[in-house]
């Protein structure tokens, strides 16, 4: 794992780039103080890699793996994990079970590699009893994950890391900063001269049914942007496109969901959750978003 | 592609806002895409105490306020007040017997005991200083700055202006800067400006003829000087860990450069003081200096420390040459003392050669043989070495404000630049060491 960062001079300030959470990451700082830039780079990368190490389900020593390998026994958790579980639980309740960090077991049968490899009912049925965050008991200091179940913080860790970095950066400096972890991003405020940040939201790959493949430029003064949906992860069979977003209640892909949804919120974790919850509504995504008092951008299938 | 905004309320977004606030410890954040301007003043304050053993003590308070405007314009206002008390060397040389001197004002006398360095103990001054600096981008990659300076002491007034231009290139990895400043100083010392080479009048200042005799040693009430400085600087970012800077400066000073309070002992062939004459320095000084600095940021394996190393070579047409080597090491100690805390050891070494007209004393013989032109026995333009050892400790308070404390030891060691010592001085300390302690407390807040 490459745990290094690069610093490059920019038109106005510096760009710190690094790799974390399976994504290219960047931090833009509108300052020419190299000592400050180095300090920010150290702080931000330390924090992102710390969260990655702690909550990645792919790392054997992570807290997440510890929970998933506890085989039904109660294990001790710290306050940060408790708060993250609380947040996940609230999202579970708000989405009426559609957002569920225990749904990862479905990945055993669903592999969104662009093929026509659709899972069968026989494969899915036995997994459904292993899904449901309400079956996981946790308290301030401990958690019991029932045997066979597992937690996946992948849906919130990146957005959480963005918000944590913004908090850390604000404690260090008043210079304008943008933190972008693989497309989920937030700013500490507008750039100098009260100028907005110009943020490009990556275009989808061009397909026959979608000609709208230009990068979308968003001007951001304050707050955070998060995007849900992915062009590259899907299955395609009999003229039907199966999105990688799974309904944890049925075990099947959400149908007619938008290709991607980008939401603006004060904090990244809110933006990410609103985008994900909207996507989980399938064809009702737009209606769901419209009911919220938020700014959003939506790409249809 | 559609951007949609909707006015209808629902609770998912509000509930998420509260949940996110609980997770991040920020409370519910309600504002969104709101414009924010940088209209806060940043205030830096510092209190400095400087104390020389048996000599001068100084206390200084600095308040600096910086405001960043929307267009990258920066206004900095700095107010400094300091007060100086204690004794300062008057230039006369130590003697095996007590010596009597007249105070610079001409009113009263003071006596220096045998074997002691003559110090004028009436040194007392209060100074207020105001600096204002305006910096702004002029064009892409060009930053300009102008400033004004006012400093007032009981007997001194200094007015100054400055202008600077910085040009960035190579993606801001290189910066070329040009600076200009001009100062106009007026000196109105108590007792007036003494006549160079005139003998210090020593006697009964209450006598009816005193005032007339004293004023015969004076040539004016005040005098002035002008200083023009030019600076050429180059800063280069070598890589993300290293930054270097080179400066060349040229300074031209014209006018009254003599110290009206300094005298020179006139010794007989045995080394016994016969007279004290007022010093005289040239009325011009051209000073040049070259400066190189490098800052290196070590990796995490070396505690992320930052080494700051600099060297300055200064030379002027008084033939003073000096070398300054300064090194600081910034060591973050967040693990031990909390977020953003650091310690910074500091070592500075200074070596100076004497001005060509410096001499610790003159002799009755020399005075008779050829009239002196320039002469000064001020140890500060003599040969010396100085060392500073200290450390600074700084940390962030819970409210985000910075606090730091600096403690330093300073020692000046004047050395003999090759002057003969007459027999009367053989057992005395002609070049006394000056020791000082510096304590500074700084506090910065937004």
Image (cartoon, rainbow, N blue to C red):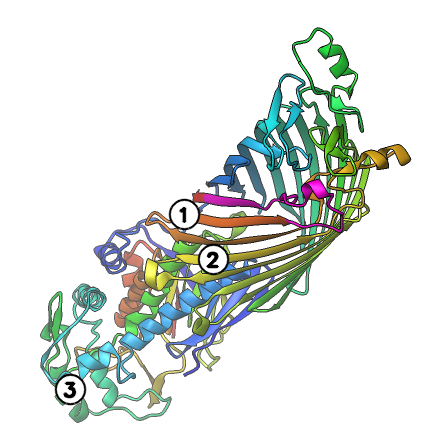
Subunit of mark 3? A
Q: Nearer the viewer, mark 1 or mark 3?
A: 1
Q: Which residue is mark 1?
A: B403
Q: Which mark is residue A61?
A: none
Q: Is residue B364 above or below residue A131?
A: above
Q: Nearer the viewer, residue A128 or A241?
A: A128
Is the residue under label 3 in contact with that under label 1 (CB below 8 Å)? no
Q: Residues within 10 Å of mark 3 (few under 14, many from 20)?
A: some
Residue under the image location 85 percent in, 33 percent down: B367
Residue B344 shows which numbered tag?
2
Q: Secondary structure at mark 2?
A: strand
Q: Which residue is mark 3?
A: A127
Mark 2, other Cα within 10 Å: few <14 / some 14–19 / many ≥20: many
Does residue B45 appear in the picture of this structure? yes
- Write down the chain letter for disc 2: B
- For the record, the magenta segment spans B414-440
Lateral position of residue A61 relative to residue B67, left or right: left
Q: Is residue B277 above or below residue A289?
A: above
Q: Secondary structure at mark 3?
A: helix
**Left or right of A97 on screen, residue B40:** right
- Residue A289 on image: x %, y %: 30, 61
Location of the N terminus of chain B (image quadrant) = bottom left
Q: Nearer the viewer, mark 1 or mark 2?
A: 2
């Amino acid at each position: 794992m490459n745990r290094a960062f690069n610093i490059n001079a920019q038109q106005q300030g510096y760009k710190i780039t690094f790799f974390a959470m399976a994504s290219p990451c960047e931090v833009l700082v509108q300052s020419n103080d190299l000592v400050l830039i180095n300090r920010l780079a150290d702080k931000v990368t330390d924090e992102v890699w710390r969260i990655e190490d702690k909550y990645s389900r792919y790392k054997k020593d992570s807290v997440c793996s510890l929970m998933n390998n506890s085989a039904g026994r109660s294990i001790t958790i710290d306050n940060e994990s408790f708060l993250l579980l609380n947040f996940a639980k609230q999202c579970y309740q708000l989405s009426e079970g559609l957002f569920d960090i225990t749904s990862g077991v479905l990945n055993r049968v669903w592999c969104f590699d662009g093929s026509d490899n659709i899972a069968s009912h026989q494969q899915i049925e036995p997994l459904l009893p292993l899904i449901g965050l309400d079956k996981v008991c946790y308290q301030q200091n401990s958690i019991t994950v029932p045997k066979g179940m597992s937690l996946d913080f992948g849906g919130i860790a990146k957005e959480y890391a963005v918000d944590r970095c913004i908090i850390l950066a604000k404690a260090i400096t008043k210079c304008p900063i943008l933190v972008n972890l693989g497309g989920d991003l937030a700013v500490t405020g507008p750039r100098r001269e009260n100028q907005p940040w110009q943020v490009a939201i990556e275009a989808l790959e061009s397909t026959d049914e979608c000609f709208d493949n230009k990068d979308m430029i968003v001007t951001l003064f304050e707050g955070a942007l998060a995007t849900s949906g992915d062009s590259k992860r899907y299955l395609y069979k009999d003229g039907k496109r199966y999105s990688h977003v799974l309904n944890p209640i049925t075990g099947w892909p959400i149908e007619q969901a938008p290709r991607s949804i980008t939401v603006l919120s004060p904090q990244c974790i809110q933006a990410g959750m609103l985008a994900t919850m909207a996507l989980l509504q399938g064809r009702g995504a737009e209606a769901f978003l419209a009911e919220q008092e938020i700014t959003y951008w939506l790409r249809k299938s | 592609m559609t951007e949609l905004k909707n006015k209808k309320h629902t609770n998912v977004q509000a509930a998420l806002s509260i949940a996110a606030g609980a997770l991040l410890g920020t409370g519910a954040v309600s504002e969104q895409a709101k414009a924010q301007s940088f209209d806060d003043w940043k205030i830096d304050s510092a209190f400095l105490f400087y104390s020389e053993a048996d000599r001068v003590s100084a206390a200084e308070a600095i308040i600096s306020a910086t405001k960043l405007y929307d267009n990258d314009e920066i206004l900095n206002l700095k107010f400094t007040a300091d007060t100086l008390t204690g004794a300062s060397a008057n230039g006369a040389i130590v003697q095996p017997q007590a010596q009597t001197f007249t105070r610079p004002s001409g009113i009263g006398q003071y006596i220096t005991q045998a074997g002691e360095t003559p110090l004028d103990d009436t040194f007392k001054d209060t100074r207020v200083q105001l600096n204002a600096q305006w910096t702004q981008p002029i064009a892409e990659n060009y930053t300009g700055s102008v400033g004004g300076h006012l400093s007032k002491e009981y007997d001194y007034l200094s007015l100054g202006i400055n202008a600077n231009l910085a040009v960035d290139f190579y993606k801001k990895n290189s910066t070329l800067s040009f600076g200009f400043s001009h100062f106009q100083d007026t000196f109105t010392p108590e007792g007036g400006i003494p006549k160079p080479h005139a003998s210090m009048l020593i006697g009964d200042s209450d006598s009816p003829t005193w005032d007339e005799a004293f004023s015969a040693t004076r040539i004016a009430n005040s005098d002035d000087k002008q200083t023009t400085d030019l600076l050429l600087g180059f800063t280069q970012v070598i890589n993300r860990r290293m930054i270097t800077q080179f400066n060349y400066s040229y300074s031209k000073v014209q006018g009254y450069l003599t110290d009206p309070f300094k005298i020179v002992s006139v010794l007989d062939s045995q080394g016994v003081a016969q007279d004290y004459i007022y010093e005289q320095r040239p009325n011009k000084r051209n000073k040049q200096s070259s400066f190189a600095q490098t800052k290196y940021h070590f990796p995490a394996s070396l505690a992320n420390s930052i080494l700051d190393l600099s060297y300055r070579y200064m030379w002027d047409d008084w033939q003073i040459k000096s070398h300054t080597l300064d090194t600081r090491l910034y060591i973050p100690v967040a693990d031990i003392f909390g977020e953003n805390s650091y310690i910074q050891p500091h070592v500075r070494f200074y070596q100076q050669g004497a001005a060509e007209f410096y001499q610790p004393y003159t002799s009755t013989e020399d005075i008779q043989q050829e009239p002196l032109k320039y002469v000064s026995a001020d140890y500060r333009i003599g040969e010396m070495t100085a060392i500073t050892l200290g450390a600074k400790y700084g940390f962030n308070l819970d409210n985000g404000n910075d606090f730091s404390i600096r403690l330093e030891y300073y020692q000046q060691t004047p050395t003999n630049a090759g002057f003969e010592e007459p027999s009367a001085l053989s057992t005395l300390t002609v070049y006394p060491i000056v020791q000082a302690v510096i304590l500074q407390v700084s506090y910065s807040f937004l």
